[in-house]
Amino acid sequence: MTATCVILDIGGVLEITPKTGWVQRWEERLELPLGTVNERMHDVWRAGSVGSVSEQEVHEQVAARLGLDAPQVEAFMADLWAEYLGTPNEELIAYVRGLRGTCRLGILSNSFVGARERETALYHFDELVEQIAYSHEIGVGKPDLRAFEAACASLEVPPESCLFIDDVALNVEAAQAAGMQAHLFEDNARTITRIAAHLDAGPLFPGRVSLG
């Protein structure tokens, strides 16, 4: 019998990640028009999300494209990571921790080079689930169907046995297209109820998207 599986997103689900306004603050500090940072850095952000640049190369590009010295680059990247990492969603993390041994558990996250080291140190997600599929490590991100296939393959489970939790509707729809069940994260209560229903139903529960 195929094991039941739950795969979760990180940012906006296991981490609470409100916008901090750090980019706008740097644009004001550097007297740049709004939108300049992302305009100059968008290809670097993209490369970092699929692991085609190193952290050192990101730092070098930040310095070159924004005209920052070494201490400024460190401060800039610290602000980036503060928003990226947010704070832990303690209630959901505790619930998922209690599921260990009752089902297969994984994470699928659109990420950035350096994320695994920081999230492992802060939140120990490597101890929470069996496998983590980071976009910067697998080379592809959601909503590309290959990202979902990689997450299922890492756990050695078929997509139809998996419930995927994400806070972005497009990714929820993509998970369904990949053959998974999917739930749009809006709050902990509804998400925990949906996971419990998935586990109660057992393996190979007919796929559907739940939006609440």
Image: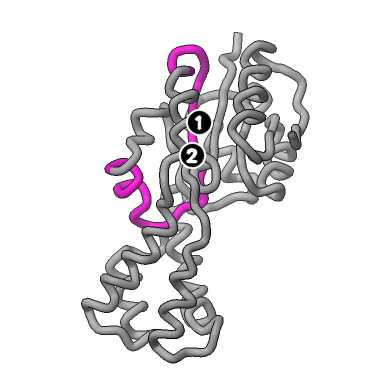
Q: Is residue 179 left or right of residue 17?
A: right
Q: Which mark is residue 14?
A: 2
Q: Is residue 146 left or right of residue 67?
A: right
Whether 212 is among the magenta residues is: no
Viewer-proximal residue among 104 and 192: 192
Classify mark 2: residues with Cα within 10 Å, few (<14), some (14-19) or many (20+): many
The residue positioned 62% from the left and 26% from the top of the image is 162
Q: From the viewer's perspective, is residue 23 above or below residue 1? A: below
Residues marked 2 and 1 touching at CB (< 8 Å): yes
In three-dimensional space, the C-alpha distance between marks 2 and 1, rounded to whole angstroms, equals 7 Å
* Horizontal and vertical percent position of residue 33: 53, 89
Viewer-proximal residue among 139 and 111: 111
- Quarter assignment of residue 202: top right
In the rendered structure, which segment of residues is drawn in magenta? 99-121
> Which residue carries the number 1 mark?
92
The residue positioned 44% from the left and 77% from the top of the image is 25
Classify mark 1: residues with Cα within 10 Å, few (<14), some (14-19) or many (20+): some
Whether 114 is among the magenta residues is: yes
Residue type at mark 1 is: Leu
Badge 1 marks a residue whose secondary structure is helix
